[in-house]
Image (cartoon, rainbow, N blue to C red):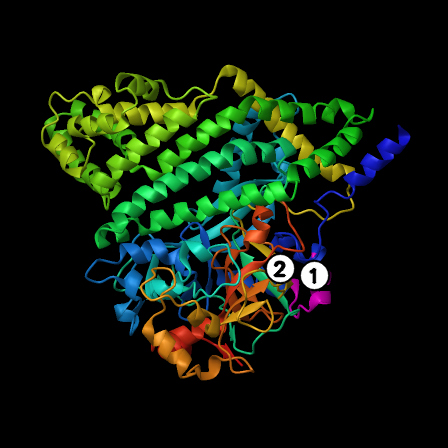
Amino acid sequence: MKKIVLFLSALLFAMPFKVKADEGMWFLMFLERLNQRDMEKMGLQLTAEEIYSINNHSLKDAIVQFDGGCTAEIISNQGLVLTNHHCGYDKIAKLSTPEDDILTNGFWASNQKTEREADGLSVRFFVRMDNVTDRILGVVNDAMSELDREKVINKEIAKIQKENNEGGKYTVSVRSFFQGNEYYYFVYQDYTDVRLVGTPPNSIGKYGGDTDNWEWPRHTGDFSIFRVYTDKDGNPAPYSPDNVPMKPKHYLPVSMAGISEGDFSMILGYPGRTNRWMPAQGVEQNIKYAYPAWVEGSKLGMDVMKKYMSASDEVRLNYASKYAGVANYWKNRQGMIDALTQHQTVQAKTINEEAFNVWANRSENKAKYGQVISDINAWYAATNEKARHDNYLMTMMRTSAMSSIPYRLSGGAEKYILAKKSVRDSMRGEFEEFANGLYNGKYEALEKEMLAQQLNLYANKSEGYEIAPYVAQIAKEYKGDFDKFVNEAFDKSIFANIESFKAFLDNPKGTVISRDPLFKLSLALMEKARYKTEELAKLEDKYQKAFRLLVDGLQKSNPDKKYYPDANSTLRLTYGTVKGLPRGEKVNDAKENWYTTLKGTVAKHIPGDEEFENPQKLIDLYEARDFGPYADKEGHLPVNFLTNHDITGGNSGSPVLNAKGELIGLAFDGNIEAMAGDVIYDPELQRTINVDIRYVLFIIDKFAGAKHLIDEMTIVK
């Protein structure tokens, strides 16, 4: 027995939380203590203060969160912003029309006056952060339920945010880390006048489409350019023709010196969400229940959208961003299923948890940690079928606009009905504007088919957990014919389209929202998404506490290791090297498998194919070898390259920097071989796929003829 305990204890100290140099998403405020020596050994030539400083300008001042979900960087002293094409995709699509299709054809502003307002786009600058763990945990105690604990913590968070926002000048966010064991606040400044400067055509920015997504080798020019504007005093301001280009505290110099395998590199960005601490049965639930439903529902949604997008340029542009988002996660979740299964992640985590249980049940630890694993496993056992159900429901609500629009409009509609005419008249303008925003770009035939097909999938596949009662009623009354139900509901509903809703606003008399068929459906779906039995609520409370104690116990049981928290859309740094992969079945066009060139881009050319047709001008430039100063030492034009950085969604658009803090590329994807990266880090296979900055400059200069933008940058040769 003693040997077994020693063996399990040894496993505990070999858990995946032991960090290697190229693993981890690190807080900037701790770089000097935790990372600087490692980074210097690998080649870093900057100090921690030059990366993150509160009192002086530093690299962090050039990094922004872009549109709430991506990363971007400032690359000129006039507020020029570089990010991925797929990060700007939604705004580019919204600025496109069939007559002026800049998503397909590209766009390059000839001067600042011709840059285009991107409505609703904002960028967020990181100002500073600080640790408030002691203060937050000082207001809770072990006797509290997780719900009571959350309420008390939220009150304290509100105080901290108010204390640090300087009268509304800054946005302050207090975030939980290590599953509620640590807390930090982050101070940001938001800028809302951001304009489109340039984008390559879709055939460059999205080259390879869904086929190449998550794959290597890659040949994608995934970049777009925007500009931040301020008022005349340099302050954030709403869009105005009188605003001026931003004068940033710091901007990134752009390196044309080239790179080699083994070179030090680092990425700063806003990784969205990782689950490295997820328990074994949580991974099992995702593999067997949640992700398969997500994949199936997403594929159905993609097929419906594609059918109508292929028949109409207007529909294609209106749904382009939505389709791209669904398609991205469709492939991601299937890749996660495959990778987590292949890596036997559940088995590995189960062994780790057995080792933890040995430590947790020692006499000095048992009272606090002894029930942790059993409480966690009880939660997952009780929610496996619910997870399947919830993912069918979630993909319906993600792909079908009509699953949520009636609910979102219903509250205002009820008030409108009950109001006096004079009050209605004052309400109408703002209410109609809100409704226009919800219906804008929606194609009724697509939305009807989407709703009917997703209802059919939901009703027939959520077998182990009760579906929404109203959906079950529809299935029974219409004998499973959801097309018939949807057609009748659209005919009767005031929420069917913007015209029927405006007709209601013209004459609300006699309207009873509660009997409207689309509202009844939307309400039923929303209520089911939020529904939780008392028994599940109790199990969840135990689970939340147990998960928090698991993470706390894992750190306490092995205190000499360096730990990093899961990603949660806060600014992080990851570092490593330029590093390739072993050559696989797909042949790379370059001598070594860490980069690709324009030769491979042209070799993939398929005339008339929406994913692999190159613009003729790009082919002409290649055949003439007209690469300008952007070719490598051997005369090839680099396109994409690999590093072993630890990134995830949200890092899209992040700058890849060399040892001097100069821009060498943009991160835009991960590789299919390491699709499990949000749960486990694989040092052998995990890679980041990046656009080489020389390809970006080549496209701007030689392809687009927009050299004035390059002249605006600081180029280092």
Mark 1 residue element? helix
Nearest to N terminus: mark 1 or mark 2: 1
- In this view, the residue in front, 604 or 107, is 604
Query: Can residue 29 be seen in the rendering of this structure?
Result: yes
Find residue 157 and report its horizontal and vertical position in percent. 52, 37
- Give the quarter of the figure containing the C terminus: bottom right
Q: How many marks?
A: 2
Quadrant where the N terminus sits is: top right
- In the picture, measured across the screen, residue 487 lies left or right of residue 286, that is left
Residue at x-position 75% and y-position 29%: 357
Residue 83 x %, y %? 43, 61
Q: Which residues are magenta?
A: 35-48
Q: Amino acid at mark 2?
A: Asn
Distance, label 1 to label 2, CA atoms, is 18 Å
- Residue located beneath label 2 in the image: 644
**Disc 1 target residue:** 36
Side (left or right) of 470 relative to 435? right
User: Is residue 630 magenta-colored?
Assistant: no
Horizontal and vertical percent position of residue 451 = 29, 33
Q: Quadrant of residue 592?
A: bottom right
